[in-house]
Image: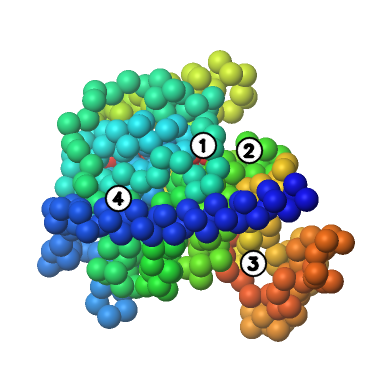
Amino acid sequence: MEEQAQVSRRRFVTSTFAAAALAGFANQASAANPEGRPSREQPKAGETTPRAIGGGSISRVIIDTDPGIDDAFALLLALRSPELTIEAITPVAGNVPLEFTLPNALRMVEIAERTDIPVAAGASAPLVRRLVTATYAHGENGLGGAVFPEPHTKPVSMPAAEMIREVIRKYPNQVTLITIGPLTNVAVALSLDPEIAHLARGLVMMGGSLSGGNITPAAEFNIYVDPEAARIVFQSGIPITMVGLDVTRKTALTEEHVRRLEAAKNPVSQAAAIIGRNAVTRNRAQGYVIGPNMHDSLAMAAFLDPSILKFQDYYIDVETSGELTAGETLGYSPVAGDLRRRPDKEKDLAAMNMPIRGSAPTLASVKTSPVLRDKFVPNTKVAVDVDSDKFFELLIGRLSGR
Ligand code: RIB
Ligand code: CA
């Protein structure tokens, strides 16, 4: 009976939270002062931004982040990428509490002299769980102990979820969400306005893994922190590119990379060098044999140059009730894993009526079959291989300005 009560309480909390989020943000949105609205104008004439169908720009991005050592590298990479139009940066609690991820994001836009980009504060806790941080990896301040001055720049008044919603509706079919932290902000935005899943151009995430986790054997950290949020995102219908541990484990920052950053005399390279030097030293002191992985920068690079990665279509869903496995991303594909069947043509993939199975129903369940969906319909492009050298050429080249 206790189990049933727990399950129903969590369902009640989840649905209550979504209702509260709707009510809460709705109030703030009406109170938000106009200057908090996204101030980015259309790209100026002559700006070489790729064009979307219908004349928009496919390079419009929102970066949702929990800086975070590797987030800092990803943010600086984005800020040094002229083909991007960064409409907003939306910090979330994750690696460290929001009280650190927010100022760290503000520090990055100041270092890159891009304080024109609105930074909108997001969630300070997951949807229905206590926040579990990664200070063991990122240090108490989130930058591995690297110290930078307090930022002067202030966040805009609009909350992150409202900013995400507002920007996507302002530029339909042009905005890509690049998420490099837990997915709480995006889940709240989708709960506020489910239609944005079909108005966004897509979502590129650092998150998940089909080859085991990093914070538990099953779960990658971003999904682990807020599995309920991740499930909302994977089931929303937004086109997803998943850059998970399967490939990010092949992106260790080295001494040589740090030396190249130290040799370049510009504020962005110097900041990345300080953070990188601290992180490499910290990793070595903790007994790791390789440097810190550039998880988030690889997701950013996947948007900048998809040729760095190889992708496979999967149906991905998220475990949310496992006592040991919550946050695990389960990948279903007729042409991978134990099934390894080869379709004659791409279109045959859908024809392969590979069912999507959940766990066997318990005696208490009214269901008799574990089949959740009777046909395989992919919802995610999963990165399954990476050209690490090409990735680091992009990352270090852009950060150092060479
Ligand atoms: O598992 C790696 C992810 O968790 C990265 O986004 C890192 O910044 C941490 O948030
Ligand atoms: Ca991160």
Q: Is residue 295 above or below residue 288?
A: below
**Circle 3 or circle 1, nearest the eye:** 1
What residue appears at the point 38 percent right and 59 percent down from the top-left corner? 22
Is 31 displayed left or right of 219 in the figure? left
Give the CA separation, mark 2 to mark 4: 30 Å
How far apart marks 1 and 2 lie (CA) works out to: 17 Å
Q: Amino acid at mark 1?
A: Leu
Q: Picture coordinates of residue 48 (x, y %)?
A: 22, 63
In the image, what residue type sits under mark 4?
Pro
**Disc 2 residue: CB within 8 Å of ligand 1:** yes
Q: Residue at x 64, y 83 (%)?
A: 347
Q: Residue at x 20, y 54 (%)?
A: 31
Q: Which residue is mark 3?
A: 315
User: Disc 3 marks which amino acid?
Assistant: Tyr
Residue under label 4: 159
Q: Nearer the viewer, mark 1 or mark 2?
A: 1
The residue indicated by pointer 2 is 214
Label 2 CA crowd tier, 10 Å (few <14, some 14–19, many 20+): some
Up-down: is 274 above or below 248?
above
